[in-house]
Amino acid sequence: MTQKKLDGLKFTWWAPSNIALVKYWGKKVGHQLPANPSVSLTLSTAKTRVSLSVVKSVETTEDTPWIDLYFAGQQMPSFIPKIEKFFKYASGELPFLNDYKFLLKTENTFPHSAGIASSASSMAALALNLIELEQVEKGVEYSKEEFLKRASFIARMGSGSACRSLYPFAASWGESDNFGSDLWAEPVDCHPIFKSMYDSIVVVNSAEKKVSSRAGHGLMDEHFYGKARYHHALTNWNYSIGWLKEGAWDNLGNLVEEEALSLHAMMMTSRPGYLLMEPQTITAIQLVREYRYRTGVPIYFTLDAGPNLHLLYPQDVRAEVQKFLEDLKKDLGANVTIIDDKIGTGPYKEDGL
Ligand code: PMV
């Protein structure tokens, strides 16, 4: 066998998680194509480091494992099937994947079972490494913009929401009448108020999700409210893009809460239905709203497909919100933790390699 170009190469990228303001929930026919456009804020503290090494070139018939994977220094065979599935799909675009064996070393800045989805940050970081390899393989150098778009396109194949983790501050994914693509996400123009915004993640339960996103998206196909939801989401997306640009946080904050509750309403009314909020989730929602109505402090909540809350607020109210969060923690009980995050500048390549 002739020595292949990529043997021995290694790249390392960090990518952050993101939190959707307008939710992606439900797919079009095809591979990971969203039924409606979504928009998210890019986080900063909750992120994943992925280093990808090309171990050696192989004959396609060789019967040894494709991928070896370490998570936080421990060999993690249980993570491999998801990555293999992703590689298999991505090899349609990146055929060189079939010619090599790979070693992946990955770690999160947040505890594995913190209830924060790590698929967005890990798939985004992995996709960035794959595009590095593609550049070498093809002998091309993409412009920064093309590089991120290509990484977003590939990340989407691993986890839909991952394609939004490639950009600083805010990103949008999905086609609308006059903007965007279902195939990759794009950066969104946003007002400075959002660039320094905080996200305090209230972890009320860190257990594995009760329903996988794949199954949840699938339940939208036959959902009685499916069409109405997609129309609703598109309308909300249109408002959000404008309000992000204008800095209209109070308008957007109310919409963000409506989106979170709509996502859960969809889950509650699926067949079968899932109730993913917990008593502490409801208590926290009521306390956040009561605090906002009483003080005028612009703090709004959102939820992913689980019981944990993301509390979003601008930098200038940080001090008073800190006090509120201390009380909230006491009210919710000893098992609740709060992860302090904020909006960030997107992925980066690790130096010195
Ligand atoms: O990327 P997936 O397939 O894990 O779906 C993510 C779905 C939500 O997190 C609930 C919403 C979103 O847009 O991120």
Image (cartoon, rainbow, N blue to C red):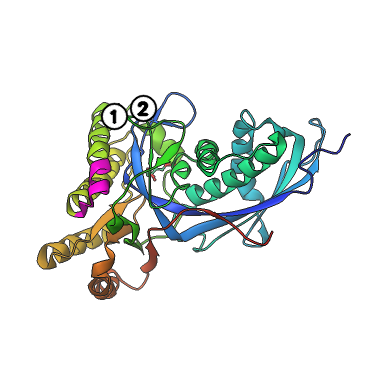
Q: Quadrant of residue 339?
A: bottom left
Inspect the magenta stretch and tell me whether residue 241 lies in it. yes
Q: Residue at x 66, y 39 (%)?
A: 135
Under circle 1, the secondary element is helix
Alpha carbon separation for disc pair 2 and 1: 7 Å
Q: Amino acid at mark 2?
A: Asp
Left or right: where does residue 118 sit relative to residue 343? right
Ligand 1 found in image quarter = top left
Asked if residue 200 is positioned above or below residue 63 in the image, the reply reads below
- Comparing 222 with 132, the one in front is 132
Q: Position of residue 31 (x, y in %)?
A: 49, 28
Asked if residue 219 is positioned above or below residue 336 in the image, the reply reads above
Q: Residue at x 23, y 52 (%)?
A: 247
Give the labeled residue for mark 1.
Answer: 226
Q: Position of residue 185 (x, y in %)?
A: 43, 38
Q: Amino acid at mark 1?
A: Gly
Instruction: From the image, give the main secondary structure of the stretch colored magenta.
Output: helix
Asked if residue 26 is positioned above or below residue 209 in the image, the reply reads above
Q: How many marks?
A: 2
Q: Quadrant of residue 186?
A: top left
Give the labeled residue for mark 2.
Answer: 221
Look at the image and tell me in which quarter the C terminus lies.
bottom right
| Residue 113 in view, yes or no | no
- Magenta residues span 240-249
Left or right: where does residue 230 sit relative to residue 115? left
Q: Position of residue 6 (x, y in %)?
A: 76, 42
Pointers 2 and 1 in contact (C-beta within 8 Å): yes
Left or right: where does residue 286 sit relative to residue 186? left
